[in-house]
Amino acid sequence: MSMPVLYALISAFLFALTNHFQSIGLKGADVRSGSLVNIATGTAIYWLAAPFFLEQWYWLTWGCLCFAVVGIFRPSLSSWLALSSIAWMGPTLTSALTASAPIFGAGLAILILGEKLTPATAAGTLAVVAGAVVATMRPEGVARGWPIWALVLPFGAAFIRAGGHVGTKLGLGDVPSAPFAVLVSNTVSLVLVASAFLMQGQRVTGTLRDHRWFVLAGVAAGLSLHFLNSALAAGSVVTVVPIVSAAPVFTLLLGLAVFRNEAFSARTVATIALVVPGVVLVAISGK
């Protein structure tokens, strides 16, 4: 297994874990409070670790600018959209719909980076996306206690994440440091989220128990971004993003084995049967 593939799979697992942590936290706190605690936690971790990876020349570079621009949208806006989607639709459906990121990512990578999408990669990508959709299916259909406009939330998060992948890939070509990319993007996002929070006179809601889950989500999300950036630094967007988008499989499996909010069914088998071969196909075609 190549390192980009391994890093992408680890990122997908951590991202799925983040979704579950946030879902639990949202039972007692609102979206904005959870997003603030989540991003602040991840940012704090990278600033504490900065002496181990940060070099002064990183700051005055094109790459740093790319990471900062990405931070305007991700994780600030994408995290808010994803959390809002989880609040409306739940973690599994949110993971499935945001799995459309490979489609957006492939288009942007081809247009901006000049990457090429091979037939094998395209087939594997579609298999992953199909598996993510199957992950949300129920015998009675997908329960919809949410308005149609709410679809903007997960699809918006997916598009922003895809754009962030391309922007990060550009930046890493100039400053090859995955943790620095997370540090800059998260810091910009935190400043924006905290500023909006204070300007609107909002207060952090929820108990310490609720925020404990958002802190855990921040740790998992921060590590997920590190592995994602490491994968992007070593591989292509059209290869890495579909594998990272296998997160719904991990969301489903974690729901079965750990969080006990899912039941084993034919849907589980079908999801794995689609996503696993899809990931393998993308991984092989990306070599």
Image (cartoon, rainbow, N blue to C red):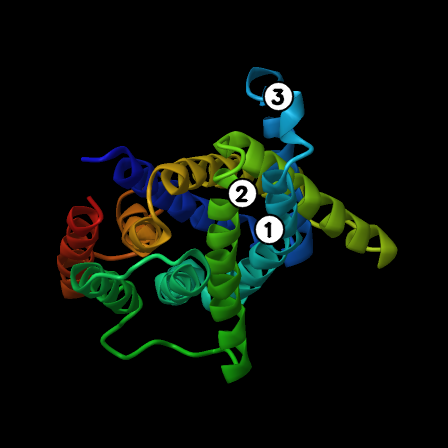
Question: Seen in the image, is 280 located left or right of residue 19?
Answer: left
Residue 180, above or below 112 = above
Amino acid marked by disc 3: Glu
Amino acid marked by disc 2: Gly
- Judged from the image, the secondary structure of the residue bearing numbered disc 2 is helix
How crowded pointer 1 is (Cα within 10 Å; few <14, some 14-19, many 20+) is rated as: many
Question: In this view, which residue lies farthest toward the bottom?
Answer: 148
Q: Which residue is mark 3?
A: 55
Image location of residue 132, percent across then percent down: 29, 63
Q: Residue at x 34, y 48 (%)?
A: 236
Q: Residue at x 58, y 21 (%)?
A: 49
In the rendered image, is residue 85 in sight? yes
- Judged from the image, the secondary structure of the residue bearing numbered disc 1 is helix
User: In front here: 77 or 59?
Assistant: 59
Residue 267, above or below 43 = below
Image location of residue 51, percent across then percent down: 62, 16
Image location of residue 8, percent across then percent down: 33, 42
- Distance of mark 3 from mark 2, alpha carbons? 15 Å
Q: Which residue is mark 1?
A: 70
Amino acid marked by disc 1: Val
In the rendered image, is residue 38 in sight? no
Residue 77 image-quadrant placement: bottom right
Q: Quadrant of the N terminus?
A: top left
- Counting residues from the start of the chain, the first of labels 3 and 2 encountered is 3
Q: Which residue is mark 2?
A: 171
- Judged from the image, the secondary structure of the residue bearing numbered disc 3 is loop
